[in-house]
């Protein structure tokens, strides 16, 4: 199935989606890699709020390449996804605390994120690696940037306005499904069968 979602994404819309479905996203997407995740969680522990409300929006594992145009406005040169496994150790806590609607990245995520997605009604969308220019073309506006001076360009929170951002293949749904882990298990089973037949 193919779905076109708009942020903030209502939980009931997320519950309709299953692994293998294709999603195109319109609305707000925020980039966040390791350091931004950790900083946001540290602020939460201190009783402070990060500068972005993540609830129901897209959280993009991405360190974009940016530049300023002649008017001094930020524009996106490339926005390829970062390997999401790097965020596995704290993505579950981030989902529980900030409740984004969809996580976007590459390579899939593990059991902890799968459980948090099921409990908090979130999904994970796989964006094809190497398609950084396609992603950049779907970003219509750079709305803001936070923590640039402290964290630098790739680790900042970049707030994007996107239109039909995708295609995103859903590999984690709200029902406990994880396509990546399912595929790994099948590959392992096939490998064992091949070894036995040698």
Image (cartoon, helix red, strand yellow):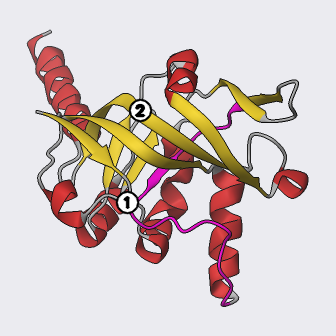
Disc number for residue 8 = 1
Q: Where in the figure is residue 133, as x and y percent of width and height? A: 57, 16
Q: SS class of the residue under badge 2?
A: strand
Q: Which residue is drawn at 21% across and 26% down?
A: 187
Where is residue 32 drawn, in percent x and y?
Answer: 62, 51
* Tag 2 residue: 165
> Is residue 73 found inside the magenta-colored segment of the image?
no
Pick the quarter of the image with the N terminus: top left
Category of crowding for the residue at label 2, using alpha-carbon neighbours closer than 10 angstroms: few (below 14), some (14–19), many (at least 20): many
Judged left or right of residue 56, residue 94 is: right
Give how far apart the Cα atoms at labels 1 and 2 are. 14 Å
Q: Which of marks 1 and 2 is nearer the N terminus?
A: 1
Residue 59 lies within the magenta run: yes
Image height of 132 relative to 75, above or below: above
Foreground: 170 or 28? 28
33 sits to left or right of 72: left
Q: In this view, does 28 lie above or below 134?
A: below
| The residue stretch that appears in magenta | 47-65
């Amino acid at each position: 199935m193919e779905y076109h979602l708009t942020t903030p994404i209502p939980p009931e819309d997320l519950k309709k989606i299953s692994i293998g479905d294709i999603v195109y996203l319109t609305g707000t997407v925020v980039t966040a890699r390791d350091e931004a995740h950790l900083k946001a969680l540290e602020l939460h522990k201190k009783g402070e709020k990060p500068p972005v409300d993540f609830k129901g929006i897209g959280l993009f594992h991405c360190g974009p390449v940016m530049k300023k145009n002649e008017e001094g406005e930020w524009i996106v040169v490339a926005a390829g996804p970062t390997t999401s496994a790097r965020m596995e150790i704290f993505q579950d806590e981030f989902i529980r605390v900030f409740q984004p609607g969809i996580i976007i990245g590459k390579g899939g995520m593990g059991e902890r994120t799968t459980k948090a997605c099921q409990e908090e009604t979130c999904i994970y969308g796989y964006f094809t690696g190497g398609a950084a220019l396609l992603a950049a073309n779907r970003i219509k506006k750079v709305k803001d940037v936070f923590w640039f001076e402290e964290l630098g360009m790739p680790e900042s929170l970049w707030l994007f306005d996107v239109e039909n951002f995708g295609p995103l293949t859903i590999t984690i749904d709200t029902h406990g499904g994880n396509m990546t882990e399912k595929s790994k298990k099948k590959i392992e089973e096939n490998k064992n069968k091949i070894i036995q037949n040698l």
